[in-house]
Amino acid sequence: MLTWRVSWWMYVVAAVYALTLLFNTRQEFWGPADAGWVLSGPFKVSRVLPGGPMDKAGLQPGDVLEAVDGLPLNGAADWFLARAHFERGHPIELQVRRGDRHLALRLVIGAPVWRTWNRADYLPPVALYVARFVLLLLAILVGFSRPEQLSARLAALMFAIGAVAEGYPSSGWAAALRHLPAVLAIPIGVATASCVVASVVWLGFFASFPQRRLSQWSRWVLVVVPLVLFGIPIVASTISMIYAPSVLARPWPVVLSMAPVRLIQDVAGVTPFLFLNELPLYQPIMQAKLLEVWFVVTILYFAAGCVMLVANYRRLDDPQARRRVGALYLALVVFAVVVAHNFFVRNWTSWFGSTPPALFSGVGFVGETLLFLFIPLTLAYCVLTEGPTRTGLPSRGGGG
């Protein structure tokens, strides 16, 4: 049963994530439409959509886009950073190289995203945002039903983070945040970027469900150290992205010259590159090492959470408790399938150089999104049916 007699900070966290989801939804559908171009190589134009914004700006196949609004384009992260500052109806200055000539073009995007979609284009974003709203509702249900239960609070936080997680900022995202008061813009930006530390919440949950497996000191170390290490750059990068985007322009060819960093971009997208960016005394090698540390910590924390669940399952005596944790174990298998499928959906063209088959196209993404909902629904069921006397774990006290 939902209860509203909870700590004040739970209301603050719930409000921030609810506002973030509403804001991101608005940007996804009402933000600036696609510019209407296709790349082949490092910002070389292979095709321009006839009648699209880039076509009207004068861009031609074979041109090389060098800068957007004064921001040099050295990597994918730079494009998404510049794109996050697009505004509908506002001129965007493009610097283009055409053969030996350097041209200055002006791009204007007037239409919102939804007006440029056909019926098939609607399916993936609608399915995605239905799943996001389900996640947020589950977060509220689980968090406010069991506010005294640590595993419930952590599960609710996982759901909330998943509801607003982005592989990259949507078009016009930072520009729209800049028009909001800072007291709203910065929390919304940080909440969106919180997916970068999702593995920390994941480990905290499985360290407390169905029974706390680590000492309080160990939990604090495993949670606080990565939150400080990654949290400070995330907050600083979020503020810079909204108010001073040029600060985040980096020599990406140098950073991406290291094979592990290129793998991180293929697996995680550009989000960690943008939000683990603003560092003191910045050096490319420093950011590359921070990204590698983040990637290793993320993998280890996700793996450790799975190992903890398996270990707890083996110790359960109560058949009902074993069924609940077994269902959650099955949900983790589904999660692995969904993650693997998502890798192929996002990277098929760049990996194989061909049009993705139906399984890894927009229709496949809709199926992936619907399958994904099995995971949070199962986790919510397991948490809400857990009780202090129903964990099914053998007692450690004396007595027979």
Image (cartoon, helix red, strand yellow):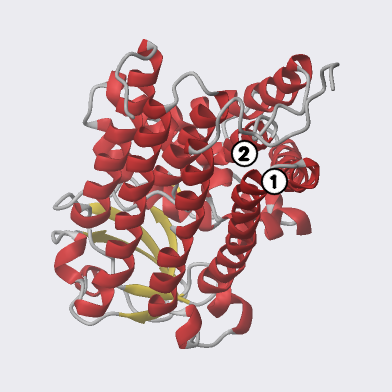
Count numbered badges in the picture: 2
Is residue 281 visible in the rendered structure shown here? no
Front residue of 368 and 166: 368
- Residue found at the far front of this picture: 400
Instruction: Decide if residue 354 is on the left or right side of residue 118.
Output: right
Image quarter of residue 205: top right
Front residue of 352 and 249: 352
Q: Are marks 1 and 2 in contact (CB under 8 Å)?
A: yes
Residue at 62%, 39% in the rendered image:
202
Q: Which residue is mark 1?
A: 302
Image quarter of residue 277: top right
Amino acid type of the residue tagged 1 in the rendering: Phe
Image quarter of residue 12: top left
Q: Which residue is mark 2?
A: 202
Q: Which quadrant of the rendered structure holds the C terminus?
A: top right
What x and y, as percent, mark residue 167? Answer: 48, 53
Q: Which quadrant of the rendered structure holds the N terminus?
A: top left
Residue at 61%, 27% in the rendered image:
389
